[in-house]
Amino acid sequence: MSNTTNITKLRVLYTGGLPAVNTKCIGYPVQNPKKTCMFPGLHTEIMKLFADRLGLTVEPLFIHSEQPFIGDVENDTVTGLLGYVHNDTVDTIALCVGQSDERRKYFDFTNAVYFSVGKAFLNVPENTWNKFFAFFQSYQYTSWIGIGVALLLQCILCIFVNRIEAQIQMRNTKKRFIEVVWQMLRLQLLQSETLQYSSMAGKFSVVVFSLVQCTVVMGVLSSYIYSNLVRPKPPLPFKTFSQFTAMMADRTLHLVELTKASIFYDTVMKSNASDFTRMRHAFSGNPLRLGTSIKHVLQLLDEPGAVLLRYEDEHLSFEAYKKCNIYMTDMLLPPAWGYFVFKKGFPFMDQINQLLERERYKIDKLWNKYLRIYRSQVGCIPSDVQVIGAKYPYIGTAITLFVVELIAIALFFGEVIIAQLKRRNRR
């Protein structure tokens, strides 16, 4: 092992973004939690833990960046923040990164620091007509079919009884099929059989009955509409990665990002796996939509169909968690381990890996503090219900009634024309 007696400092590169570091803390970089900075940063605290256990002093280098660009190794050239480690400006970066064969040629990596789950943040596109016709969604479609079947059986039974009554001479004439059906439909709507009354008492009772009927029907209608102003959220529109790719290909969904150097996009562009090959084809017709800043990316996420893919320990994930109108799922990105990267041949690598094992419980506590408690304090708690604007169901109901009236008017004029033709034929 290399000589470590002459090394007294741990040179660390800090950059922006929770949970790694909290650049909003006064007097940054803050190495330990204080009253003025309760959350100095997950990686800040871990680096301070390493330095304390190794008897070193942290020498910070801060580069402000809203969304750090880790960099990579391309054509034997090291890019991004990794370049500071490669040219010996710093020993390490206060961020967890992924490993690759190319990176391992130039850098040493610690054992796994923590486990990170991939998250997909989706603004599921809505069907506008669902807002307008929420009244008809008070029941499931199977319920409406059941109501229709029950009404049909009721009409069939009435027709059967009517025929039997005519045969045994309990009534003088048989009613036509259409008359029985019309009578049953009127009965469902609480409509009286006839409005022809000679007495004032009879006319008055019809008025009262009509008022009650209107009150009941409109009360039921309002209840149905109100029940649909708040209803359960629709499920995710896909269940598999191939379905997600298909929705990307037909432009139902689109990916938003801050940089093309994201893990997912880079994997899709370089992998020859069949799923990623199809995704590359989808990107050719539905390209990545890039934002100029985190704020801009979050604005792009407000568009229906937008999808943001991030691991839960990234700063952009914390910001996306604050949005209450999006879906979150962990079914698209595989989980991953994060590692600290050091310059090649760093003399304390064995000690740091031993520290990671000995201090596993403390590091897990820090992880939980930042990714669980912090997120619950500043993030949005997603609701299980979908709120529909109050005007839409009423507009949809009005449209439906208008269409029904148009049909009724068309039938009326059709009957008038047929009656006129019959009258001419009689002449």
Image (cartoon, rainbow, N blue to C red):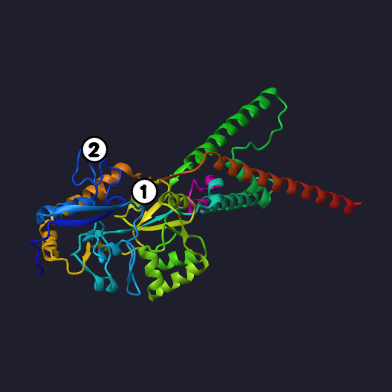
Q: Which residue is mark 2?
A: 36
In the image, is residue 354 above or below residue 179? below
Magenta segment includes 340:
no
User: Which one is nearer the viewer's eye here, 309 or 305?
Assistant: 309
What is the magenta range?
133-144
Q: Position of residue 240 (x, y in %)?
A: 39, 65
Q: Residue furthest right?
A: 427
User: Which one is nearer the viewer's eye here, 407 or 412?
Assistant: 407
Magenta segment includes 139:
yes
Q: Residues within 10 Å of mark 1 (few under 14, many from 20)?
A: some
Q: Amino acid at mark 2?
A: Thr
Q: Secondary structure at mark 1?
A: helix
Q: Position of residue 251 (x, y in %)?
A: 52, 62
Q: Which residue is mark 1?
A: 319
Q: Residue at x 63, y 44 (%)?
A: 399
**Left or right for 103, reference 356:** right
Q: Amino acid at mark 1?
A: Glu
User: Which one is nearer the viewer's eye here, 159 or 329?
Assistant: 329
Q: Residue at x 51, y 64 (%)?
A: 286
Q: Secondary structure at mark 2?
A: loop
Q: Quadrant of residue 69?
A: bottom left
Q: Is residue 188 visible?
A: yes
Q: Residue furthest top?
A: 200
How far apart in space, not on screen, are marks 1 and 2 (Cα)?
22 Å
Tally of numbered tags? 2
**Left or right for 345, reference 123:** left
**Left or right for 41, reference 178:** left
Majority secondary structure of magenta residues: helix
Q: Position of residue 328 (x, y in %)?
A: 37, 54
Q: Residue at x 23, y 60 (%)?
A: 90
Residue depth check, mark 1 versus mark 2: number of the one nearer the observer: 2
Q: Is residue 240 visible?
A: no
